[in-house]
């Protein structure tokens, strides 16, 4: 085969691949779509996923279900699963550092995934038991520093969204604290509520009812302004820790080899669904900001967070 024939053949192959990808996007989804959540039921991620599933099912006129597959197994099932959009994942910003926490993943949390879009952001709230002796952030920090072995804190794990918040808190305050990992955010909250652990971070739409009913005490919240739902809870800046700037995000990813036309279509359809005023208002009442982004912008955010929080998490995981 001469060079001209080779180039013609290569061009035809590339064109065929492009046509195939475009055709796949035009017919997507042609089967049931699973949204995998690598956290337990009742978690912030799970709640968002079920809302998104309902919206996309209406848009696509196709069944979209949520499957809870807690832990690395759930994440791996996407990285190594079908790259046709039939399985996508909704997760939190802990995904950006999962490779730091687990050295032998068998997959790359960046390269083996196709970022689709951010879905939401929310402030995090520092909670303690309702009968804890410390009633302010300053008192809690003082107590944590005074105890030789440190106070305990719960989270869904070092690399979870609330786990990252705790590591940032420890780094900024110099407080010695011991992690007691739990299966998910609801279990973490119950641990604090019972007094089994001294502190945790949570989100309003997961722990707000417990805070408002007095079953948990909130000491501070991230963000530039107080949450309207918790007007008596100061921001970290107001409470004396202005450098603690951290909001949690939640986003959607697919298997890394998923064709770009399919990724782009999911991103567009998701963005359209997230502009629903009723949906935005519903989550705003829960302290959650619904938002979307392009695949490229979301990938840049993943990489940035990996670099920003990777060292903190690496130090915590030993």
Image (cartoon, rainbow, N blue to C red):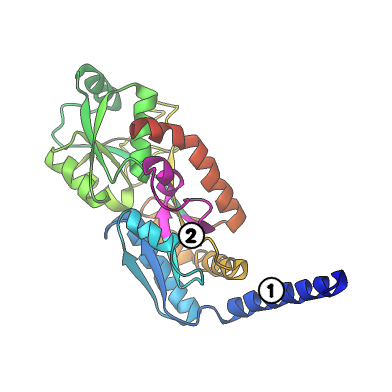
Q: Is residue 287 left or right of residue 262?
A: left
In the rendered structure, find residue 93 and report the number of the disc placed on it: none
Residue 266 in percent (x, y) is at 54, 68
At 39% from the left edge and 28% from the top edge, which residue is drawn? 238
At 36% from the left edge and 67% from the top edge, which residue is drawn? 50
Query: Toward the viewer: 193 or 78?
Result: 78
- Counting residues from the start of the chain, the first of labels 2 and 1 encountered is 1
User: The magenta stretch spans which residues?
Assistant: 90-119
Q: Which residue carries the number 2 mark? A: 253
Answer whether residue 108 is magenta in the image. Answer: yes
- 147 over 215 or under it: above or below: above
Residue 25 in percent (x, y) is at 59, 76
Dividing the picture into quadrants, the one containing residue 286 is: bottom left
Mark 2 residue element = strand
Cα distance between the residues tagged 2 and 1: 22 Å
Quarter the C terminus occupies: top left
Residue 271 in percent (x, y) is at 55, 64
- 240 over 272 or under it: above or below: above
Q: Residues within 10 Å of mark 2 (few under 14, many from 20)?
A: many
Mark 1 residue element = helix
Q: Which residue carries the number 1 mark? A: 18
Query: Toward the viewer: 127 or 117?
Result: 117
């Amino acid at each position: 085969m001469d060079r001209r024939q080779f180039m013609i053949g290569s061009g035809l192959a590339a064109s065929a691949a492009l046509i195939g990808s475009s055709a796949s996007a035009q017919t997507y989804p042609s089967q049931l779509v699973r949204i995998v959540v690598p956290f337990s039921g009742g978690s912030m991620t799970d709640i968002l996923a079920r809302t998104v599933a309902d919206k996309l099912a209406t848009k696509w006129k196709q069944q979209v279900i949520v499957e809870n597959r807690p832990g690395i197994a759930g994440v791996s099932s996407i990285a190594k699963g079908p790259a046709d959009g039939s399985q996508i994942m909704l997760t939190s910003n802990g995904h950006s550092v999962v490779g730091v926490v687990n050295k032998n993943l068998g997959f790359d949390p960046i390269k083996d995934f196709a970022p689709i879009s951010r879905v939401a952001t929310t402030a995090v709230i520092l909670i303690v038991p309702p009968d804890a002796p410390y009633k302010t952030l300053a008192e809690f920090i003082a107590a944590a520093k005074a105890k030789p072995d440190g106070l305990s804190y719960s989270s869904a794990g070092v690399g979870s969204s609330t786990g990252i918040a705790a590591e940032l808190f420890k780094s900024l305050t110099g407080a010695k604290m011991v992690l007691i990992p739990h299966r998910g955010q609801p279990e973490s909250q119950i641990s604090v509520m019972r007094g089994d652990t001294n502190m945790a971070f949570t989100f309003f739409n997961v722990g707000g009812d417990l805070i408002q009913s007095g079953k948990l005490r909130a000491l501070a919240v991230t963000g530039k302004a107080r949450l309207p739902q918790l007007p008596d809870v100061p921001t970290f800046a107001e409470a004396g820790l202005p450098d603690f700037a951290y909001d949690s995000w939640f986003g959607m990813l697919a298997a890394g080899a998923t064709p770009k036309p399919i990724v782009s279509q999911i991103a567009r359809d998701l963005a359209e669904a997230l502009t629903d005023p009723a949906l935005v208002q519903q989550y705003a009442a829960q302290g959650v900001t619904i938002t979307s982004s392009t695949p490229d912008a979301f990938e840049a955010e993943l990489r940035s967070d990996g670099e920003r929080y990777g060292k903190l998490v690496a130090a915590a995981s030993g």
